[in-house]
Each structure stands twice: as structure tokens, then as C-alpha cells.
Image (tube, rainbow, N blue to C red):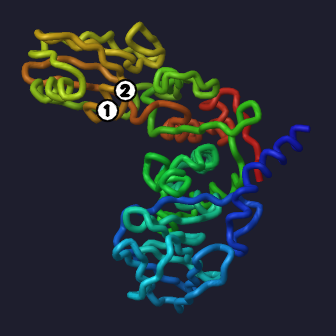
Amino acid sequence: MVRMHRFFMFLALIAPLLFSMPFTYASWQPEISIGLMNGQTSVTLLGHYGALSIYTSLEEKSFLTVPKEKSLLIEVRNGTFLINGKEKKMERLIVEVSDGGVIQVNGVSYRGYITLFLKNGVTVVNNVPVEDYLYGVVPKEMPASWNMEALRAQSVAARTFALKNRGRHRAEGYDLCNTAECQVYEGMGAETKASTEAVDSTRGEVLFYQGEISDALFHTDSGGMTESSENVWGSRVPYLRSVPEVQAKTLPWNRSISLARFVQKIETAEKKIGRLKDIKLSPLQIGKGRGDRSISGRVLTMRVVGDKGNIILTGNKIRSLFALPSTLFSVRILKSNVEFSGYGSGHGLGMSQWGAKAFAERGKNYKDILRYYYTGVSVEKLY
């Protein structure tokens, strides 16, 4: 019964994709669309080892073929496409490369095919099977020199995140962006032997929680203890629970901000406080929460006292205002500066990448690592 349930979930997942893919890419593997560029006035494409075929839609035959190693220049003028200097009145172009070839977009190579459409210039999208997408993601999210079990854990987390968040940028015309806002993706130029092996060896594996794909968030380093979702998002996610790391006080950092700049940033974003008199915040103790700190030690709230007013800021607000690596910090007022000192990097939710490395080096396999960081999940083979 469980296997049948997974089968029908998989059909629901990929059915829209199968009908939207050209024949050469239609398969049992889901496809995902990645926004590469927005608002471009011109884009150069080239078929490396294969000819380019250009379509107006997936249902029609190609109207133009460009020989391999020959450039295709797409421009926009007065809201209209120019293809190698010739006007073509349409809103969308689809560019495929013949079997065995690779498409280059402004010199960067991508698997899959390319869609271009008019929206404040040209938006360029890479339509690519999920596994091929991961080849260009995993080595950008985790160093390929790290332990293979850590790379496998990253591969499953990245695959899960991509499938869970597909459609996040639907309003812009694609599923995910290619930056850290979603996952960093740099196409074939980023690929490495080790990271590709990690993706292949976990092919189709996804994290589930009670029958649904999990939102497998990850971050660089927790500083010693990960965070629970309600302390970052304000809502409880049962599998995003705070757990301790192998090591504490990792990735230490310091930031110093002038008193004038500190007050200016707060007053611009919030309200007048005048001359800074005090900052009230409990001492940092990882694993011991207080009223203004979560159990991991991260700042929930901090009171800033001025001679013209007081204000309580959330830890997330402070991190955003002063571009701090994390909310796991202490703060003190010096003669002319406010000094922050803390640990870790990122929001602290889900898997800590440096923590995964530490576990892997101590002999933990990738499934154990994932089940540790995502409470109550199961690792399932979706396809």
C-alpha cells in the first residue's frame, strides 16, 4: 500500500511535466525550469558538438536550424525578437541542441534546452531534468573535496528542496532561480566527478515526512546547534527541530559597527532612539535558552535603549540590518563602536553543511545524517 501511494504521488508530481516537455526530453525523470537571466537586451547561444533547432512552441516543427559551433544572436528591439538580425514576431522561443550536443548561453554550457520569452527584455530559462540540474548545484552548494557521505546528504537535500519548491518563481516564468535564494546553479561548468557521483548514487532519493515531500532547508554552519522553524519563520514545522552538533562554537566571526552607523540603521528602519545608552541581551550559551534567546542560543529579541526611545528588535531583523552571518551572537558597546561576535553562518534550519561534514568524517552515512537533521523524515526513492 505504501509503495502504491508513492507511485500515485510520483504520477501527480510528473504528469504536468511530461506533457510540457519535447519528445527528446520526455522521460520518467521530472523536469525543472531554472531562471538564468532576466531583462536581457541580447543573448548569444551556441550549439557545442550539435546543431541548434529553434521552435516557437513544443507542438510545432523547428523554423530554423543553426549549424554546430555557429552563434545564434537573440536580441530584443521594440518588444520584438531579432534572430541573427531578422525580426520574428513571437513571445517565446525554444532552443534545443541535437543529440550529444551542449547549449552554451553567453559562453556557459547547460544540459537540457533553453526557453526565451519577452518580459521587460528577454528572460532566459534552462529546462533540465532534475538529476542533470543537481550536477550543477551540488558542487556549488558544498565543496566537492568533502567526504562522499556529506556530498550524498547534500544531493538528497538539494533534490528534495528543488522538488518541494518547484514553482517558487512561477510569476517570473520558471520554477527556481539560479542564486542562493533558491540554490546556486552554474550549469556544466560547475560539475565535478565527485559531486556527480554523489548525485548518481542517490538518484531519485527524496526526504518525506508523513507522506509529503519535506522542505529540506540547509545552511552553511549552525555554530553548534541547529534551530527550530518557529524561531525563524514563526511557524512550527515538525521535521525542522533544533539538534546539537558534533562540535560547538564553529565558524566564529566578529563585526564592528560605529555607534553612529548603528543608530542610523535602526532609525532608518524603525524609529528614533537618539543617543545609544544600552543594549540588553542575555549572555550567549549554546543549548540553553532564555526569554530573549532560543534553546540553541540564537537571539530571539534584543532591546536597544536610547536617550529618546527604546526598541525591541528580533534577531532576524538585527541580522538583516547589519548583514550578520547568523543570529547566534553576543553584543557589546565599546567607546565608539558596537561589536557583534558570534558563530555559524546561515539561518540554522535543517542540515548544517559543516555539521554534515563532521558527521561523515566520523563514519555516519548520508541517510543517518539526513535523519539526524530532519526529525522524523524517511529517505524514499521517488523515481
In the rendered view, does 38 fall on the left or right side of 338?
Answer: right
Q: What element carries label 2?
A: helix
Q: Position of residue 310 (x, y in %)?
A: 21, 10
Rendering quarter of residue 341: top left
Q: Position of residue 208 (x, y in %)?
A: 71, 37
Farthest residue toward the top?
291
Instruction: Check contact, mark 2 vs mark 1: CB within 8 A.
Output: yes
- Looking at the rendered structure, the kind of residue marked 1 is Ser
Residue at image x 22%, y 14%? Answer: 304
Farthest residue toward the bottom?
67
As displayed, is residue 16 above or below residue 158?
below
Farthest residue toward the right?
1
The answer to which of 196 and 364 lies nearer the viewer is: 196
Label 1 packing within 10 angstroms: few (<14), some (14-19), many (20+): few
Q: Position of residue 72 (x, y in %)?
A: 45, 84
As displayed, is residue 150 above or below residue 355?
below
Q: Distance between the residues labelled 2 and 1?
A: 6 Å
The answer to which of 318 and 167 lies nearer the viewer is: 167
* Residue to which mark 1 is pinned: 320
Q: Is mark 1 on a helix, strand or loop?
A: helix
- Looking at the rendered structure, the kind of residue marked 2 is Asn
* Residue to which mark 2 is pinned: 316
